[in-house]
Amino acid sequence: PAAGVRSIPHDNMRKRIAEHLTRSLQTAPHVTAVFEADFSAIAAHRAAHKQAFANEGANLTFTAYFVAACVSAMVAAPAVNGRWYDERVDIYEDINVGIGTALGEKGLIVPVIRRAQTLSLLEIAKQLTDLTERARAGKLAQSDVQGGTFSISNHGVSGSLIAAPIIINQPQSAILGVGKLEKRAVVRGDAIQIRPMAYVSLTIDHRVVDAFQTNAWLTKFVETLENWPAEA
């Protein structure tokens, strides 16, 4: 390399990430819609229940609520949980949610919570705890990262408010992005209140999903989070 340049050879993970993401952008027309979500209800629920979940061996994070809300949203727009083929679109009954997990400088891995539509919040939290711990310890099996039908990117944990487009994990048709949680002034009725808010986005493969379905999905997702029952 030239003077003043430090060359870093690509490792196998970086090569795989580069190939996969480039192919996704070349294959699918990406479109992103952004909504805003009030986290008051899930924040209150988490504060009230995180110790009980910990007693069961589960770290109750906001991601568990996101997975559960994704299941509800799929009812409003099932094609989001689908896959494009040249002759057809397949829509999957099982909702297998990949969770983007950062590995620091090493890159990114996406372990999968399978059949999320059959799981309680506690069961989701237990699986998330297990998968995240094993991902960061480098102990995931190949089967742990296969079979996803939809993905979530919690990009906000690093500070970003909005990321668009988040590249879809092919051959899936959509990916949810959740931005940084922060207190904001919002209007409720005729009053200004301080609420914990975050931007949530859905990036879709426009071959499979249109704007109407995208907005229906996000509407249901946000409604589920904002109306989370206190004792659910």
Image: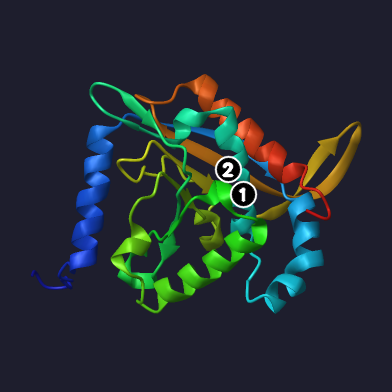
Q: Amino acid at mark 1?
A: Ala
Foreground of the two, 26 or 150: 150
Kindly indicate the quadrant of the structure image that contains residue 193.
top right
| Crowding at mark 1 (Cα within 10 Å: few <14, some 14-19, many 20+) | many
Where's residue 76, x and y in %? 59, 28
Task: Name the residue at 50% across, 55% down.
Answer: 155
Q: Tell whether 14 sits left or right of 218.
A: left
Where's residue 99, x and y in %? 46, 57
Q: Amino acid at mark 2?
A: Val
Distance (Cα) linking label 2 and label 1: 5 Å
Mark 2 residue element? helix
Task: Name the residue at 23% across, 65% down.
Answer: 13
Q: Tell whether 225 sits left or right of 116.
A: right
Quarter of the image for the N terminus: give it: bottom left
Residue 113 seen in this snapshot? yes
Which residue has dot 2 on it? 71
Where's residue 152, x and y in %? 48, 50
- Name above or below for residue 162 compared with residue 78: below
- Name above or below for residue 72 compared with residue 44: above
| Crowding at mark 2 (Cα within 10 Å: few <14, some 14-19, many 20+) | many
Which residue has dot 1 on it? 68
